[in-house]
Amino acid sequence: MVFAPHDISVHSGPRGEMPDVIQAQGGNYSRSDADVTVRPAVFPSGIKAHIFVSWLHPYKEQKLVVVGDRQMAVSTTWKR
């Protein structure tokens, strides 16, 4: 299964807190392990994160989107 520790660290580092809850739902379509996972996470401060990981997605890129009550920030895309 794709664990995505780097993705969790990207969310945890700036906040200085680890998530209280991380759920995972995935599917295996072409391998015996999960090819695709969706991981919602909830932090002690109430902030929520959504991590999507896919071995099947044709574009291997990462993007961080931070949504606030008035604005949103989108990082530039970087490829793995």
Image (spheres, helix red, strand yellow):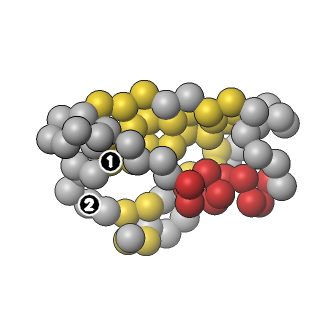
Judge the density around disc 1: few (<14), some (14-19), many (≥20) Cα neighbours within 10 Å: some
Cα–Cα gap, marks 1 and 2: 10 Å
Query: Quarter of the image holding residue 75?
Result: bottom right
Residue nearest the observer in this picture, 65 or 25 = 25
Q: How many marks?
A: 2
Res. 74 in view: no
- Which residue is found at the position 22% from the left and 38% from the top? 32
The kind of residue tagged 2 is: Tyr
The kind of residue tagged 1 is: Ser
- The spot of residue 69 in percent (x, y) is 73, 38
Q: Return the mark for residue 54.
A: 1
Q: Which residue is mark 2?
A: 59
Judge the density around disc 2: few (<14), some (14-19), many (≥20) Cα neighbours within 10 Å: few
Residue farthest to the front, as pictured: 32
- Which residue is found at the position 56% from the left and 29% from the top? 23
Closest to the camera, between mark 1 and mark 2, is 1
- Which residue is found at the position 62% from the left and 33% from the top? 22
- Which residue is found at the position 28% from the left and 51% from the top? 55
- The spot of residue 24 in percent (x, y) is 49, 31
| SS at circle 1 | strand
